[in-house]
Amino acid sequence: MRAVAIVTLVVLGGIWGSAPALPVPRSAHAVVVAGGAIHVLGGPGALSVDRFDGRRWSRETSLPGGAVNAPAAVAVGSRIFVLGGFAGSSNAPTAAVRVFDTRTRRWSSAPPLPSPRGGEAAVVLHGRIHVLGGGNSVSTLSDHSVYDPATRTWSEAAPLPRAEGSPAAVVAGGRIWVIGGRSGLSDYGATYVFDEAANVWTKAPPIPPRGTAGVVDWHGSIYLFGGESQPRASVLGDVLRLAPGAREWRRVSRLPTPRSYARAVVFRGRIYVVGGSTTFGDVHASTGSTIVDTFTPG
């Protein structure tokens, strides 16, 4: 159990705070809010699913079927869907979809992904789960697979304009935004926006290229946190903001500790940036960090 310990730092663009540290280090992990709490799961060798209720961390359950790194996870009502990922600390992808109900605390299975993948992004739009990009053991993917929990069926929507792994994705303004990503040794900075009704992707303002960044929608503005630059061989600390209707992203702050896999969620009126790696190049075998920062935009 990790009790609350808050330190605040007022900086240009908002207020940073320090929340209780994770029970175990995490990177290449997933973070999701469900059942009134933050849930953290995945990462090389990490079997536990840890829960934060706003005051302390506790071990909620364990992943069935073994550890996965770089999975995607989303919440639909009280259920957490854990989608794909790479087995253990390898780059062997899985198509498994595991479902945890936060009310009953029981696991079940959903129909598997149409094809195995890890390092993908996932969001929920109008009750359906959109799984975007990622990679298998051979190449990165442009796949855009859509799961309907009501019918338990998968379908395919318009693919990403480019194959990419480790993009950031968020729903804002009723549309899906996919930001950055990478393939091999190349990093990307393009921002793509998906219109579900038209089944079409369009371009939006780009960011400085990176993969593994965290992202949230905060009152209509999109905030992007950290990530990793392969050409610069460094983890990043930028906090970038795209305001509604803006033509460019603005740097508004910096993470107190730069890191990749800077998973971000909105919880109880603050943005939490949970875990991530402080060392460049730590992917499938990364031990990650226990850092949990909070940010309240100004």
Image: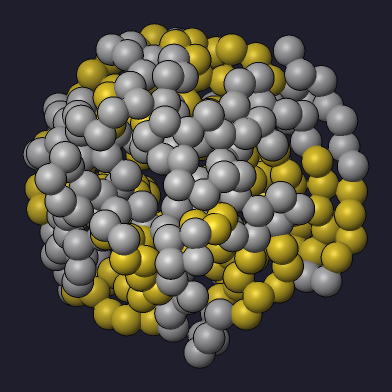
Quarter of the figure with residue 153: top left
Q: Quadrant of the N terminus?
A: top right
Snapshot colouring: secondary structure
Could you tell me which residue is drawn at 27 percent across and 80 percent down? 202
Residue shown at the point (56%, 63%) measured from the top left = 224
Q: At 65% across and 53% down in the image, what residue appears? A: 258
Asked if residue 201 is positioned above or below residue 279 in the image, the reply reads below
What x and y, as percent, mark residue 230? 43, 61
Image check: 66 left or right of 5? left
Q: How many marks?
A: 0
Which residue is at the front of the view, 270 or 116? 116
Of residues 56 and 29, the one drawn nearer to the viewer in this rendering: 29
The residue that appears at 56% across and 34% down in the rendered structure is 288
Can the viewer see residue 265 in this picture?
Answer: no
For the residue pair 37 and 115, the one nearer the viewer reads as 115
Answer with left or right where residue 237 lies relative to residue 189.
right
Residue 30, percent from left and from top: 46, 36
| Residue 144 place in picture, x, y as percent | 18, 55
Q: Quadrant of the C terminus?
A: bottom right
Q: Describe residue 82's horizontal placement relative to residue 153 as left or right.
A: right
Q: Looking at the image, is 159 positioned above or below residue 81?
A: below
Kindly tell me whether residue 161 is visible in this rendering.
yes
| Rendered image quadrant of residue 181 | bottom left
Residue 116 is situated, as x and y percent measured from the top left of the image, at: 15, 36
